[in-house]
Amino acid sequence: MSDAPDTTTLEPVPPSPAAQPTFLDRALDNLRTRWREIAASARGAVGAPPRTHLPKEDAERLKEQIEACLESRGGEVSARARAAQLGRTYLALDPQGRRNFLMMLARDFDVDREAVTEAMATFQAAADPVARGHAERALRRALEPPRLRLLTQFNALPEGVKFLVDLRAELMEMARDEPLLQALEDDLKNLLRAWFDVGFLEMHRITWDSPASLLERLIKYEAVHEISGWQDLKDRLDSDRRCFAFFHPRMPNEPLIFVEVALVQGMSDNVQALLDPSAPVCDPKSADSAIFYSISNAQSGLAGISFGNFLIKRVVDGLATEFPNIKCYATLSPIPGFRRWLDRTLERDGDAVLTSAEAERLAGRLAELEAAASGGPAQDEAPDESPLLARALARPGWHEDEDLQTLLRGPLMRICVRYLTTVLTTGHGRPRALDPVAHFHLTNGARMERLNWLADRQPKGLQQSLGMMINYRYRLGEIDTNHEAYSGDGRIIASSAVRALGKAG
């Protein structure tokens, strides 16, 4: 997905990279500034700021501050001030200091297992329903780690929820090989999942008239098709385009996830044509198709907390009301895992992925190209034993050689359909598509409609999926049925055209 701005009236002026602080630096400076006044009343209890790498003796002082926070010494206002000071302290630490801080939080503010054992014994000994109810509530409290109460206090601070979202993004990286931090990360994920329930989220359309700071965030967060600048963003927000995002009331200026839509005639099969800045602007009322060409999660700290499916359904409902002539709701989606899977498959199966006729024709063309490059047939060099497909795809500009890409089109599309429709992994005990984008749209009730050859010739598209893209189509009357087939049985719904491609050859 991508975004772009305008060069007419009141165009936002992008910051100069050489003269301006980075987007993240400005955000952190703003957060420290906003919390400074709140934290001021806690400074007397905190003492000197810790060293940036947070050695053990400094961590012990911070531990005392956290205990004071949890005990609410001096009341809720003081606890809020201490939380603000803790947040400012964390932001001032270097990477090692932050890791030490989080390790201390994970280790020293975990569940009190002796208290849990005692509460369990009381519950098991309860003789009547009233006593059992009291004991059950006590057991529930004992099972809640104190660090959760500390993290919850940030909810009361300006931008405190955003701080926790960014904290989890850092924690996810640190927790990969550290069980203590994994438990802390899981606690924070569950807390954020409750706060970011879809019932709390608000969907808003983003336009060129939206605040410049929000438009800047779109450029920063676009994860599918890079936005090349303000004019590119403006084009993507033109009258025949739509951009919608989910927001949380406690993060009103931060999109959580956004989708970019093109209102066109016919189902798009090429992303460069779809985003061509020189293409004429269409009358949206004449459009018969809405193409979702980019969906970007804007907050890495909310990974694993899904609300993209709700956004798509809300957008479809809104567009159906605004443009009753639209009959086709489809994506133009990347296939990000295909090339990686294909390379592994070629290492294992070699030329067995090709028919004998395909292998013969491809070998002949490669021999011609290699002979031309060397000035004649090689006499003394050992023949290249790597798989034919691997040799062809290793050639720079293979997609611009008409003869070569014609030979590759049939086998690569057949193999890609195999990847999309039959290569499954197991998630939560149920089969699911290995490709993450396929899994997302199939879970939402779409079907695989059409595979498009060389639909994205940009380096990223060629690297990830050899330029292929796929349309997932949302038929309003089939969404629930398709969702149940995939989520319940792992059955992938695909059009007859897609299925036929998988059998060709």
Image (cartoon, helix red, strand yellow):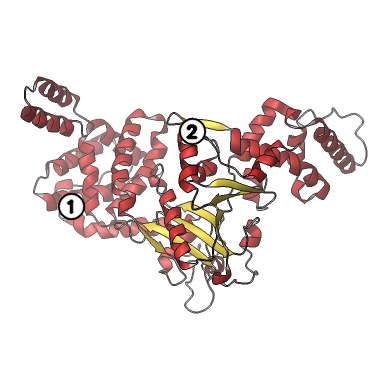
Q: In which quarter of the image is the C terminus?
A: top right
Position of 248 with respect to 46 (left or right) is right
Distance from disc 1 to disc 2, alpha carbons, whole Å, reads: 52 Å
Mark 1 falls on what kind of element? Answer: helix
- Residue at 39%, 36% (x, y): give it: 174
Q: Which numbered dot is residue 408?
A: none
* Residue 366, placed above or below residue 199: above
- Residue at 38%, 34% (x, y): give it: 175
Mark 2 falls on what kind of element? Answer: helix
Q: What residue type is labelled 2?
A: Asp
Which residue position is annotated with label 1?
81
Image coordinates of residue 423 in percent, x first then y, are 58, 33
- Cβ–Cβ below 8 Å for labels 1 and 2? no
Image coordinates of residue 418 in percent, x first then y, are 64, 36
Position of 154 with respect to 136 (left or right) is right
Q: Which of 415 and 222 is in front in this view?
A: 415
Q: Which amino acid does label 1 sit on?
A: Ala
Give the mark nearest the N terminus, 1 or 2. 1
Which residue position is annotated with label 2?
489
Toward which corner of the image does residue 107 lie, by quadrant?
Answer: top left
- Residue at 35%, 43% (x, y): give it: 168
Q: Which of 321 and 30 is in front in this view?
A: 321
* Residue 35, placed above or below residue 74: below
Graded by Cα atoms within 10 Å as few (under 14), some (14 to 19) or many (20 or more), the crowding at tag 2 reads few
* Residue 360, placed above or below residue 221: above
